[in-house]
Amino acid sequence: MRRRGLQLFAVQVLGNALVLGLAYYWLGVGESRAATLAWSGVLALFILCLACCLHGSILVFLRADQSHSLFAACRTIVRHLAPFLAAVVFIGAVYWALAQWAAYSGTPALTIASWFTLKLRKPIKPTSVLRVFNFVLALVRWMVIPVFVLPMLSGIAALGWRGFAEFGRMRRSRLYWVAAPLLLACALALPWELIGWVPHVSSFTLEMFSFVVRTAIAYFLFLCAWTLLASFTSAGKPLLTQLKTTASP
């Protein structure tokens, strides 16, 4: 089973590097002309499809009810790419709406603080209300939505449109309620903070060395955390447990 783990790791490293490289190139594509704007749109769609195929195949590969072959997992996600893309776009729209609410929440926070100040005869700071809003929003973003939609994405990747029925499949697992937000933070938030952290060094060479090291650590942190999360989501158990389990004849 070590071979499966090495294959999975290699696909993750190379595939995500390709996606990131294409995304970096896409950021530099001009949009001043109709042709370049069209190319930018086509490239963006291709990158999205490639990322969906990559991560969808990982979700399929780690499911206990699917073939233990990366090639078969890739073929499966390609067949189910349309529903998987639809789910990803919808989830992206939900997160976009939450971002809009986060930007707007200062206004209702001020209104609520004023109302409580009037009723309680005690000053309530709008920042206090805003902190409550931000806390609830963080719970929704990092815990509630992932716990319900990640199993659905795994189901869609493996079963197509029927996979939507797996919405919230892991909601009764207390471990998953803890593991999902923690692993998501390790896969997304922590690498971002690590790359953005700039230590004080004495030369440009040390700055570049620090950046390369931090980027490499952030990249592999993302890979490890996402793979663990995918294994919990798809099979309900850690990846190491799956790799040590022999396939039934």
Image: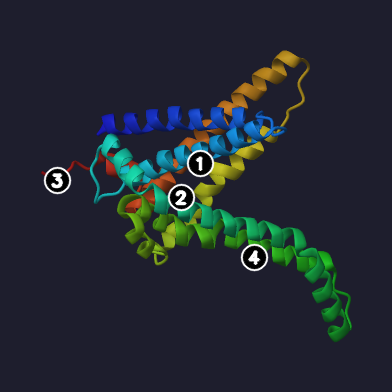
Q: Amino acid at mark 4?
A: Val
Given contact means CB atoms under 8 Å apart, are the residues at marks 4 and 2 in contact? Answer: no
Q: Amino acid at mark 1?
A: Leu
Of residue 61 and residue 51, the one placed in the foreground of this image is: 51
Q: Amino acid at mark 3?
A: Ser
**Image depth: mark 4 or mark 1 in front:** 1
Task: Please report whichever mark, 2 or 1, sits nearer to the chain's N-terminal start.
Answer: 1
Q: CA distance from mark 4 to mark 3?
A: 44 Å
Task: Please report whichever mark, 4 or 1, sits nearer to the chain's N-terminal start.
Answer: 1
Residue 120 position within the rendered picture, expressed as x and y whole percent measured from the top left: 84, 84
For label 3, the SS is loop
Identify the residue position indicated by label 1 in the image: 48
Of residue 9 and residue 97, the one placed in the foreground of this image is: 97
Q: CA distance from mark 4 to mark 2?
A: 28 Å
Task: Please report whichever mark, 2 or 3, sits nearer to the chain's N-terminal start.
Answer: 2
Task: Please report whichever mark, 4 or 2, sits nearer to the chain's N-terminal start.
Answer: 2
Could you tell me which residue is drawn at 40 percent across and 57 percent down?
Answer: 151
Given contact means CB atoms under 8 Å apart, are the residues at marks 2 and 1 in contact? Answer: yes
Identify the disc placed on residue 248. 3
Task: Please report whichever mark, 1 or 3, sits nearer to the chain's N-terminal start.
Answer: 1
Identify the residue position indicated by label 2 in the image: 85
Could you tell me which residue is drawn at 47 percent across and 36 percent down?
Answer: 223
Task: Name the image quarter holding the N terminus.
Answer: top left
**Quarter of image, res 155:** bottom left
Identify the residue position indicated by label 4 in the image: 136
